[in-house]
Image (cartoon, helix red, strand yellow):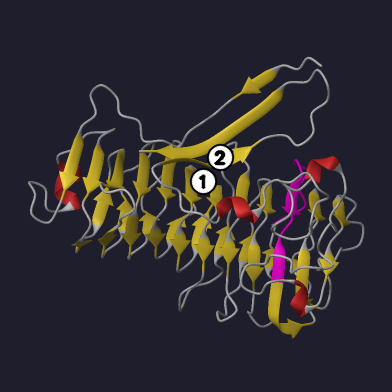
Amino acid sequence: MNRSFNLSVVFAATLSSAFATDRVVSPTGTFNTITSAIAASSDGDRILVAPGVYNEFIALHKSVSILSNQEGSRFTLSGGVTLQDFDGKSLTISGARLMGGVRATGTYTLRTEVRITDSFTYSCDLDEPSIRVELMRDSVSGEVKLSSGMIVGCTLLGAPFMGSLVQLRGTTVLPEDVHVVGNSIGSLTSNFQCIEVSSTVPFHIENNFIVDNESGHSAIRILLPSSMVQPASTIVNNSFIKATVAALPAIANVNGYHFNLIVKNNAFFGFTSGMITATPFWLQLIASNNLQGAANAMNGFTGQPMPGSIYIDAGDPDPRYLDLDLTTNDAGCYGGSNSRANFTMGMGSAVVGFMQAPRVVSQGDPVNISATGFDR
């Protein structure tokens, strides 16, 4: 069989040009603050930060990478990171504890990129139409707001006085779909609404473990401003838990507007009104192979089906949804080729964080693959 392959690999990488400079920050070094190193830097430079606590707030207006200079260690920034006059710029952060979170001020009309990998941040408030956000293998104690981007392999637990843990908001001018894949969102001891969608671009919420104990709300609330004709959004192979059983669906289309949506292969417990409530005449909704089981059918801390669980081999048997071992797709976040098992380890110095590839390709058609990753 002959097939052509188009391989497009796009790394969210920190690459040094011939003119880039590395500046090392340490409590006793030439640069003993991150701010001073940034002030001496130009676009494209790297700031390599030694372990320690840096009591400062960072205001950024240059394209730089801020990285831990020791593999497997993290530095702590007690304040936050604010993007100022950052339109059209690019920021990469890795190996950090950002106790004050990340936010943007000013006007953004050019494509602006923010990548945070293998880090902790208090919150991420970057829902600007021109900002592309990539969070990979991070922990977030507060909320994430974005218009364009991906949240992959992260842990989002919530913090006091925060809203929904993931907020896909507004209209972006950037072409990419939004992806929320392989995350752990909420916990059995938290009381936060998990995901809110008001974005008008296609979104893909897949292989997440979602625990929502917010009284009166579903785990995913869709708040679109109008009916839309667009490529299909997907909510596929997620595990949902409502620890306090409630007469709610796991997914609520709050405003009742219609759009192309595929909801399948999800496992859920505690939402007694089912997976999603279909409003009348919502012909663009495809919902199948969503399964409600007993509490003991799912591991309450990981979303993984327990031995003998009704979720095993319960997903859509179409080959495009095969599990990693090429057996029939399990329902829930450990089913399918995007299994959450892919996202439970730390990133390290060089890794592909997320790969997008077609699951089924017709003979003779090109195979288009794209990947996002990080290389120090």
Above or below 77: residue 204: above
Please give left or right for residue 95 compared with residue 335 in the image.
left
Asked where in the image residue 85 lies, by quadrant, the reply is top left
Q: Residue at x 78, y 20 (%)?
A: 365
Based on the picture, tell me whether residue 151 belongs to the magenta stretch: no
Q: Residue at x 22, y 34 (%)?
A: 42
- Amino acid at the residue labelled 1: Pro
Q: Nearer the viewer, residue 271 or 232?
A: 271
Please give left or right for residue 231 compared with residue 176 in the image.
right
Q: Please tell me the numbered disc located at residue 296.
A: none
Q: Please tell me the numbered disc located at residue 173.
A: 2
| Element class at badge 2 | loop
Residue where numbered disc 1 is placed: 129
Taking the image as drawn, is residue 253 in sight?
Answer: no
Magenta region's main secondary structure?
Answer: loop
Taking the image as drawn, is residue 212 in sight?
Answer: yes
Residue span colored magenta: 225-240
Q: Residue at x 64, y 30 (%)?
A: 369
Residue 107, horizontal then vertical, whole percent:
40, 46
Label 2 crowd bin: few (<14), some (14–19), many (20+), radius 10 Å? some
Q: Mark 2–mark 1 contact, CB under 8 Å?
A: yes
Residue 330, horizontal then vertical, whole percent:
79, 56
User: Which of the image's four quarters has the C terminus?
Assistant: top left
Please give left or right for residue 225 compared with residue 176 in the image.
right
Which of marks 1 and 2 precedes in the sequence? 1
| Element class at badge 1 | loop
- Amino acid at the residue labelled 2: Val
Asked where in the image residue 318 lies, by quadrant, the reply is top right
Name the outermost residue toward the front: 307
Q: Residue at x 79, y 45 (%)?
A: 322
